[in-house]
Amino acid sequence: MAYLPKSKVNIKEASQGEFIFKKNKKPFEGKYLELSNGKYHAGTNTINLGEELIKSVEESSNNQMGSSFDVKKYNILIPKKKKFLKNTKTIPINKTTPTEEDYNRGYYIRYFARRINQPKGYIEVNFDTVNKLQEKVDYDYNLYEAGSITWALKNGTRKTNNNNLRLLEQTFPFISSLFPILNEFEIIDGPLTTTGGELYYEDGREYIGLYHVHPEKGPMVGVEHINEPHAFLNYSEELSSLTDNIDRTIPIPPPIPNVEVKQPPQTPLRSMLQDRTTTTRSTPSIRRTPTRRSGY
């Protein structure tokens, strides 16, 4: 199988009712892979991908409020609010892919929405959805707030996109969880270079300079691939995952029990001073012998 770096994959945990298997439509719960092409696969194996998953269709939406006593009371007291919520639609998830014009420009704008009562309740949407939220049409504009981010597309995008996300975190905390693949949709059509904080040798040393991405071996040293040996490189998150997977073969010694150490009795200060004044040290006399100086 072609090289599938972890930078192109995001490992997540599916909650109950979030996903179903694409083939048999049975519910799925557990860890899964989110690929940069928008597909989902069961398990965490990046070499032999598990069965494909699809998101479950939400059966409950904002306009289905139930029939409990509290709901009925709410409907009587606030009929206008009920009517408004009944006419609202569920916001659709939409991962917009860049166009040829976007690639020529080198970036494009991605849009998102967040439920104001859920700190991590982000979904990716398109411009039309954001526009309707701002115009207070179709969707519950009281429940959602919208935003956008400039997304780099060409020749080493990870650092730029990471910096943009960090700036956006000041206004939208946890927004980075919505865009975990920093080089998503990236294309390479020129020399790549890193100024630091991005690529590392296999022994953990930081790499700064020109590099290229081999389709099967991943990032490597040098502006282009050559037949002579040249070093492999790892992205920062890949390097940390490699160290996490190392088996601990060295046995860890058991903890040392706490042992109470008894301090020796303290000598009174007065007696210590007396001992110092009465104790004398005998210094051996040094007998000097004349030395001969050599002549010329």
Image (cartoon, rainbow, N blue to C red):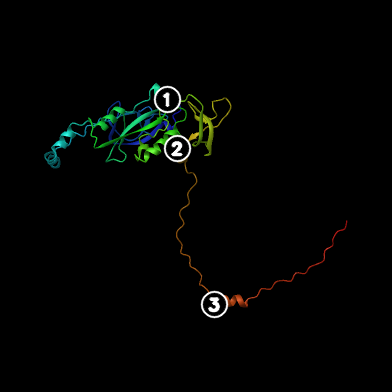
Residue 63 coordinates in the image, percent (x, y)? 19, 33
Asked if residue 100 is positioned above or below residue 177 in the image, the reply reads above
Crowd rating for badge 3 (residues with CA inside 10 Å; few <14, some 14–19, many 20+): few
Q: Residue 180 vs residue 190: left or right?
A: left
Q: Which residue is mark 1?
A: 105
Disc 2 versus disc 1: nearer the observer: 1
**Given contact means CB atoms under 8 Å apart, are the residues at marks 2 and 3 in contact?**
no
Q: Which residue is mark 3?
A: 270
Q: Quadrant of the N terminus?
A: top left
Q: Amino acid at mark 1?
A: Arg
Residue 117 coordinates in the image, percent (x, y)? 27, 41
The quarter of the displayed image where residue 279 is located: bottom right
How far apart in space, not on screen, are marks 2 and 3 (Cα)? Answer: 64 Å
- The number of discs equals 3
- Secondary structure at badge 2 equals helix
Q: Residue 67 vs residue 92: left or right?
A: left
Which is nearer the N-term, disc 1 or disc 3? 1
- In the rendered structure, find residue 237 and report the number of the disc placed on it: 2
Looking at the image, which residue is at 38% across and 23% down? 99
The quarter of the displayed image where residue 145 is located: top left
Looking at the image, which residue is at 32% across and 33% down? 112
Q: Amino acid at mark 2?
A: Glu
